[in-house]
Amino acid sequence: MKISVIIPTLNEGARLAATLDQVRAVLPAAELIVADGGSADDTPAIARAAGALTVMAPRGRGPQLAAGAEAAHGHLLLFLHADTTLPADAAEVLDRAFADRRTLIGTFRLGFDVGGRFLKTCAWFTRIDSVFTRFGDQGIAVRRDFYAQLGGFPAWPLFEDVELLRRARRITRVASFPASVITSARRFERRGHLRQQCRNGWLLCRFLTGACPHRLAAEYAVETAVSISP
């Protein structure tokens, strides 16, 4: 099964090369696609130098992921964040999971690049399938034809992953792959582990009760800018 790995980026020049090298190491036959949202740094140049197909898209994870999927040729689409690394046995894990034709979509479990009991506990719950425990930072793998059936990612800057998985659950089981990706805990480190998780939960609850994802994303961007200002 040909795999297309789609990575949305915005000013990820400091870490993108390492991410692409790691993906290439564990999925050597995969098609690499970087969907850039208008980076002001050298992200697109790094992507091209690594041999990744680079597509430009309107800024926002939803539009970027959709643009990357449209350019992909693989039978299996793997959506991966730029600050996330795959497990060493990712190829075998995906082969086993999708050898079963009933498996249409799934995510890896989550791990963080820093220790601490709180984040480890949060990560443990990602093996359970629910709207509160499965997100795009775990890596979403989906058959291309099923992705099209779901209508793809909505053109939202936030919670596009929650919506795609929510649509999928109306039709099928979202598989939990028995391996973990490792994602950056940079936002948790910056704002504080408990504070960041509470904020994430508050935004998610507001989204699930009808708040506009564009408005929530704008609020989050303002808060993030304030939190990192000198």
Image (cartoon, grey):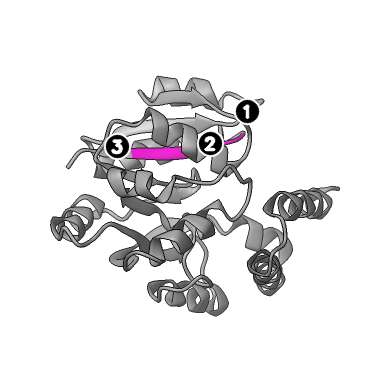
- Provide the secondary structure element on which disc 3 rests: helix
Q: Which residue is mark 3?
A: 24
Specify the principal SS of the magenta part. Answer: strand
How far apart are the alpha carbons under marks 2 and 1?
12 Å
Who comes first in sequence, dot 2 or dot 3?
A: 3
* Label 2 close to label 3 by CB (< 8 Å): no
Q: Quadrant of residue 59?
A: top right
Quadrant into which the N terminus falls: top left
Residue at 49% across / 75% down in the picture?
A: 120
Task: Give the Cα separation between the discs numbered 1 and 3.
Answer: 22 Å
Q: Is residue 92 left or right of residue 141?
A: left
Q: Amino acid at mark 1?
A: Ser
Mark 3 nearby-residue class (10 Å; few <14, some 14–19, many ≥20): some
Which of the marked residues, 1 or 3, is nearer the chain's N terminus?
A: 3
Label 1 crowd (10 A; few <14 / some 14-19 / many >=20): some
Residue 52 circle label: none
The residue labelled by disc 1 is: 39
What amino acid is found at the position of numbered circle 2 in the picture? Gln
* Range of magenta residues: 5-10
Label 2 Cα neighbours within 10 Å, binned few <14 / some 14-19 / many ≥20: many
> Is residue 9 rendered magenta in the image?
yes
Percent across and percent down for residue 86 are 35, 52
- The residue sitting at 49% across, 46% down in the picture is 153
**Dot in front, 2 or 1:** 2
Q: Which residue is mark 2?
A: 64
Q: Position of residue 28 (x, y in %)?
A: 22, 36
